[in-house]
């Protein structure tokens, strides 16, 4: 069971999702398009993300288009790529750069960049924005020299962590730098990291390229290490919740110069890293590495031909693979194009494509979309007189539409393995940094940049799939789907793959597995003239039917001091549950404590597969008790498919 907090009109609700039940995958539309956005000057993007309303937010810089120096540029697009609003931010008379944007749980944004506004060199500049891009607060963070910022991620407490480098606080060369901010921008901790014990040896340059929550309250950091001789290595450093190095550090050398650029958690708990590697005879190639959960290298590959190729960003994919974006020199016209490569979980290339025209086009950032496709941003010199932002909304296989013509081409850059050496015994140190925090004067403007539609698909297919989370060997599991067409003609075709070699072209097949295991399933829905709509997931097959007990608070009402509530106990798997107990509590917190009060104990003699048993009560909660908590089978009397979904919490009205 997973609990998600949402806020509506200032009131707290808890939404309960059951892992063992059959739930429909969200209906997705496969609408692709390509646009160019910019003004009369030069623009370039650094980050992009799909937003909770189905649109997109991108950030970068603009220079000369809207007056003044180079400024940070933020653009909100709707789901079809139309500009909803845009903002520029200027912190002073100098030039701002960067542009990392991440949406927050309340629909607002964190925007990270750097500015020379204070005259000490560049400072990290963090802006907290509301849902329409207006500033809630903004502050700079730094020391007496230069700071830069490459990564930012919101945290569960409403704050954020960011990483980059600093030349302040006693460092001469670049030291890796990371900081944790509260929701109001107060520094929780800020630390620099360097090779060595007393001080970093002269000439070494370290930069935190990615900082990401590790799922256990700490963070994983990807650090680029450049030695005085020009060689580059990959440093994986785990941090605890206070920014202190914890766990095993790994300094990974590939026998040549490596420049890591992005890291994302893989489905198996490890990490994917993408970037740039210099390979003898090839020049720069795209780098892809796989680390296990503790940071040890599993495999590493380079991809590219005789020309320049590299990756600047990437994201893990739900099927256990990875998608990377960057630049490669096109063999067809000799110019550089945006390059997107989809890898499987072992680093094998599933597909790769280039996007662009006769000028220089570079892919800067990529995000996953809710239908299994991708949103890509890059800078382009192919579609106007200046450098502009190219935005690509891609299908799960990298396609846009036949109307794109030569914009999309299939690439064929070869891949090869790399060898790696992993050092865990080197000296690496961390020290606190006394950060100067300033609220600078800034100027925010609305802008009126032009945008051009290069191509767009008119035929759209939306699809959904409903698949049980579990099943039993030899008993047919029901797979069902639906599809909706917009501006399409012809018949819909369904293609199921069940993960064990079995397939079906039926819309709603029933399929029996022959052996226990967890099987990845996929559904592709197609129509003439449309890109496929895809859904995927997994089903776990056991050798015998077992129950899975959980439930939901289906009715909670308060009248004066009394609470009337109904808890619906549920068996969401295939086996019958024998005798067990359900206990209902009032609680001050969302977890049980000594001050929680037991309201009712219900003994259940049995509950069939799929069965629901309502348990109602009326009671007066003690003072300061704000939550209802149900605990199903607290004694563990029933062996279940999932023992982790037996506690269900609901806030009282």
Image (spheres, grey):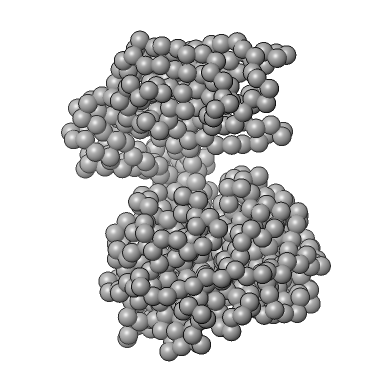
**Foreground pick, 275 / 30:** 275
User: How many numbered markers are drawn?
Assistant: 0
Q: Quadrant of the C terminus?
A: top right
**Which residue extends farthest bottom?**
229
- Res. 330 image quadrant: bottom left
Q: Residue 150: in sight, yes or no?
A: yes
Residue 192 left/right relative to 126? left
Q: Residue at x 64, y 26 (%)?
A: 626
**Which residue extends farthest left?**
514
Residue 74, image x and y in percent? 68, 61
Residue 438 left/right relative to 164? right
Residue 124, image x and y in percent? 66, 69
**Foreground pick, 236 / 465:** 236
Residue 602 left/right relative to 84? left
**Foreground pick, 75 / 420:** 420
Residue 451, image x and y in percent? 66, 62
Q: Residue at x 55, y 37 (%)?
A: 4
**Which residue extends farthest front?**
594
**Foreground pick, 13 / 324:** 13
Q: Residue at x 76, y 75 (%)?
A: 118
Residue 210 left/right relative to 472? right
Q: Residue 547: in sight, yes or no?
A: no
Residue 415, image x and y in percent? 30, 71
Q: Is residue 483 above or below residue 228?
A: above
- Res. 281 image quadrant: bottom left
Q: Is residue 244 above or below residue 538?
A: below
Q: Residue at x 38, y 69 (%)?
A: 250
Q: Quadrant of the N terminus?
A: top left
């Amino acid at each position: 069971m997973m609990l998600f907090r949402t806020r509506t009109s200032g009131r707290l609700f808890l939404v309960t999702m059951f892992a063992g039940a059959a739930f429909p995958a969200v209906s997705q539309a496969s609408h692709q398009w390509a646009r160019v956005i910019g003004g009369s000057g030069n623009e370039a993007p650094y980050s992009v993300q799909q937003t909770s309303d189905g649109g997109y937010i991108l950030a970068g810089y603009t220079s000369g288009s809207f007056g003044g120096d180079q400024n940070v540029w933020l653009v909100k697009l709707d789901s079809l790529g139309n500009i909803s609003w845009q903002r520029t931010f200027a912190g002073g008379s100098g030039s701002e750069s960067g542009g990392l944007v991440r949406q927050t749980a309340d629909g607002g944004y964190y925007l990270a960049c750097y500015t020379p506004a204070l005259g000490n060199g560049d400072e990290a500049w963090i802006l907290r924005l509301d849902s329409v891009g207006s500033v809630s607060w903004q502050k700079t963070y730094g020391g007496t020299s230069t700071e830069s910022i490459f990564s930012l991620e919101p945290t569960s407490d409403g704050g954020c962590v960011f990483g980059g480098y600093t030349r302040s606080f006693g460092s001469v060369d670049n030291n890796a730098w990371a900081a944790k901010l509260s929701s109001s921008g107060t520094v929780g901790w800020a630390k620099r990291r360097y090779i060595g014990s007393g001080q970093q040896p002269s000439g070494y340059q370290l930069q935190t390229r990615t900082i990401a929550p590790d799922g256990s309250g700490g963070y994983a950091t990807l650090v680029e290490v450049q030695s005085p001789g020009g060689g580059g290595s990959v440093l994986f450093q785990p941090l605890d919740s206070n920014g202190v190095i914890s766990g095993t550090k790994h300094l990974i050398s590939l026998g040549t110069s490596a420049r890591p650029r992005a890291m994302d958690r893989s489905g198996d708990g490890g990490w994917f890293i993408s970037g740039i590697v210099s390979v003898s005879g090839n020049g720069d190639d795209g780098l892809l590495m796989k680390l296990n959960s503790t940071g040890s290298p599993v495999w590493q590959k380079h991809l590219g031909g005789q020309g320049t190729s590299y990756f600047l960003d990437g994201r893990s994919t739900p099927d256990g693979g990875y998608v990377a974006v960057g630049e490669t020199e096109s063999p067809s016209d000799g110019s550089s194009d945006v390059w997107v490569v989809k890898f499987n979980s072992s680093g094998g290339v599933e597909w790769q494509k280039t996007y662009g025209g006769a000028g220089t086009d570079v892919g800067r950032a990529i995000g996953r979309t809710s239908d299994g496709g991708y949103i890509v941003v890059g800078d382009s010199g192919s579609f106007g007189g200046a450098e502009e932002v190219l935005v690509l909304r891609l299908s799960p296989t990298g396609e846009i539409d036949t109307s794109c013509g030569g914009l999309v081409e299939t690439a064929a850059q070869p891949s090869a393995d790399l060898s790696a050496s992993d050092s865990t015994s080197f000296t690496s140190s961390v020290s606190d940094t006394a950060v100067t925090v300033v609220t600078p004067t800034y100027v925010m403007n609305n802008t009126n940049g032009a945008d051009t539609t290069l191509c767009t698909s008119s035929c759209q297919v939306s699809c959904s799939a409903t698949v049980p989370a579990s099943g039993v060997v030899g008993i047919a599991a029901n797979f069902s789907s639906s599809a909706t067409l917009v501006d399409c003609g012809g018949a819909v075709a369904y293609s199921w793959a069940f993960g064990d070699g079995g397939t079906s072209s039926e819309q709603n097949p029933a399929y029996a597995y022959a052996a226990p295991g967890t099987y990845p399933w996929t559904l592709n829905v197609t129509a003439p003239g449309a890109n496929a709509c895809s859904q995927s997931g997994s089903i776990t097959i056991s050798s015998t039917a077992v129950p899975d007990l959980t439930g939901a608070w289906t009715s909670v009402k308060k009248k004066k001091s009394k609470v009337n509530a109904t808890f619906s106990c549920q068996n969401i798997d295939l086996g019958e549950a024998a005798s067990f107990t359900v206990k209902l509590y009032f609680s001050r917190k969302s977890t049980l404590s000594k001050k929680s009060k037991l309201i009712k104990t219900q003994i259940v003699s049995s509950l069939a597969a799929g069965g629901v048993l309502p348990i109602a009560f009326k009671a007066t909660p003690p003072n300061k008790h704000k939550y209802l908590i149900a605990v199903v089978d607290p004694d563990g009397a029933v062996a279940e498919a999932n023992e982790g979904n037996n506690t269900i919490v609901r806030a009282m009205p």
